[in-house]
Image (cartoon, helix red, strand yellow):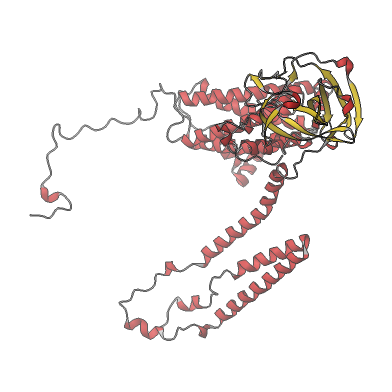
Amino acid sequence: MYPLDWLEERSGLVGAVRYFLFRKVPGDTNWFHTLGSATLTAFLVQLVTGVILAMYYKPDPQNAHSSIDHITHDVTLGWLVRGMHKWGASVFIILMFMHMGRVFLFGAYKYPRELNWIIGVLLLATGLFEGLTGYLLPFDQTAYWATVVAININGTAPFVGPFLASLLRGGAEIGPDTLARFYSLHMLLIPGALIGLITLHLYLVIRLGVTSPPWSSEAAGSGRPPEPPPASAGLVRPRPRAAVKGRPTE
Amino acid sequence: MENPRGDDQRHQPPPSLWPVGFAVGVVCLLVGLIVSWPAAAVGAAIAVVFGFLWARDVVAAGRGPALPEPAEPEAAPTAPAMPEPDPVERFPRSVFLEMSTLGLGAVIGGIVTVPAIGFAVLPAFLKQHSPEVDLGPITDFPEGQYVVATFLRNPSEGEISRRTAYIRNNGLVSGKPSFTCISNRCAHLGCPVQPGGPVFDSKKQTVKTKNGEVDLIPALPAAGFICPCHGGAYDQEGNRTAGPPVRALDRYEFLIRDGHLVLAGTYSVASVSGSGAQAKIHRYQLAGPGQHIDSPEAWLYPVQPPH
């Protein structure tokens, strides 16, 4: 097809996408292997709905809650997009844990995929931080006090805790800048980190391939030809002394 | 016999750090043009000095005879036992260029990144202060009774700075007014503690002060103060009596100015012995909720950020 050929000739992108979509995976993958893609899909839903919500949301203490009210009750389909974002957040977190559980139970974190497990753990922490910062944004009583408690839990960390809490609040007390700070973290910094980590995660998935389930007959090593039997049974005949390297000949 | 590679190399200026200094000077000059004239002058001086040194080196390298070469061609064939100096040992120009490119990139990146990170981090720790709050005439606080005072700690910040304190007039102590000013911030994780008893909303009065409107509602916290979040409980002096809090409730410092009760900074309290005007308050520097201040665990929080 001409436009695709044009693109492929100049960028190689078509081949890259084709390689990604049609790469070989083990024949006995099953539905559990879709949890990672499901998590990615949930993240993309959050990304899209979040961008739309940002068009209507006002991140300052005076207007935040009324703008949420406006989104939910006045803006056409606002209730739907906000609902997708709100519930999708939980779906994203739950799917991350399920995906993690699948990887753990299938032993898919083992060599050579340890690094991808570590990136996954970072993704989990970053995703939870995304949840924490997003929770303040509706700016109702639940949001406010839950965030107060969350910040103060951070504040009880040994040595650095008090500074961590001040850093999160943007000051000694929750002030007018705290909400905008959380908003900026929630929609710029953390999603950027998530996108970067997801890119690395997918790169390693593609590079290292998908693991078979542990019960697979195609599991690693089972397809290897059998070891040749030893040339002679019993004790190995000692080599003549002269042949042993480093010994002076007699 | 002609050295096949020597002639080529002799005319190269030797690698030096002068261009780097020159570049730093130029950067300093350009930044100084925007930021301050003295910095620009310093930058110009650095650029001139390093530029001169650089130019001198380049010119000196161009003068071939300056190198003490002529003796070597005779010496080389007569002393073949001496191994030739390994050419790889020399600091090659390409490595120098790579390093200076990376270094300059790092410098530029740092110039951009460091102020941005400082802008994100430092405001959380600098210019922190607790403004004084005028709660109105002390005659509005009946002796021996708790009043729920709700006020804007910092009116310029708006509603977000609204705080609540439980104020009790303890009467006169040796001629001076005594008040108990308890913060409603739970010492567990910072939820708002509530009076354990009736709050007489119908007797609410609003006082206009320098801090805008202050609401004063009489209350009878017979059971002390109770936190709705995780069940922390305190007695009327703010001592922890039950639940997860690690210490007593924080208190406000107060002063009387022109007959008005004025709240100042907050401090943390390990415990209070006695009550009312005779209370002995074991006070500490303000710490965040959940942070120990007087037990061995207090070693976990040796330094507090500015409040």
Please, is residue A95 above or below residue B118 in the view? above
Relative placement, left or right, of B300 versus B183 is left
Quarter residue B256 falls in? top right
Q: Depth check: give the residue in front, A151 or A56.
A: A151
The image shows residue B116 at horizontal and vertical percentages of 70, 48
- Drawn side of residue A142 relative to residue A33, left or right: right
Give whichever of B168, B116 is nearer the camera.
B168
> In the image, what residue occupies the spot 84% across and 29% down?
B151
Q: Residue at x 84, y 15 (%)?
A: B200
Task: State the count of labels.
Answer: 0
**A246 above or below B293?**
below
Residue A24 visible: yes
Residue B92 or residue B289, whichever sits in front:
B289
Residue A137 locus on image (x, y percent) = 74, 29
**Picture quadrant of residue B296:** top right
Q: Which residue appears farthest toward the left when viewing the image?
A: A250
Residue located farthest toward the right when viewing the structure as drawn: B208
Residue B274, image x, y percentages: 69, 24
Residue at position x 56%, y 36% in the image: B299
Q: Nearer the viewer, residue B10 or B206?
A: B206
* Residue A200 sits in quarter: top right
Placement of the N terminus of chain A among the 4 image quadrants: top right
State which quarter of the image contains the C terminus of chain A: bottom left
For residue A44, say whether it is visible: no
Query: Residue pushed farthest top?
Result: B198
Q: Is residue B112 above or below residue B18?
A: above
A6 over A78 or under it: above or below = below
Q: Residue A87's x, y, as percent?
A: 68, 21
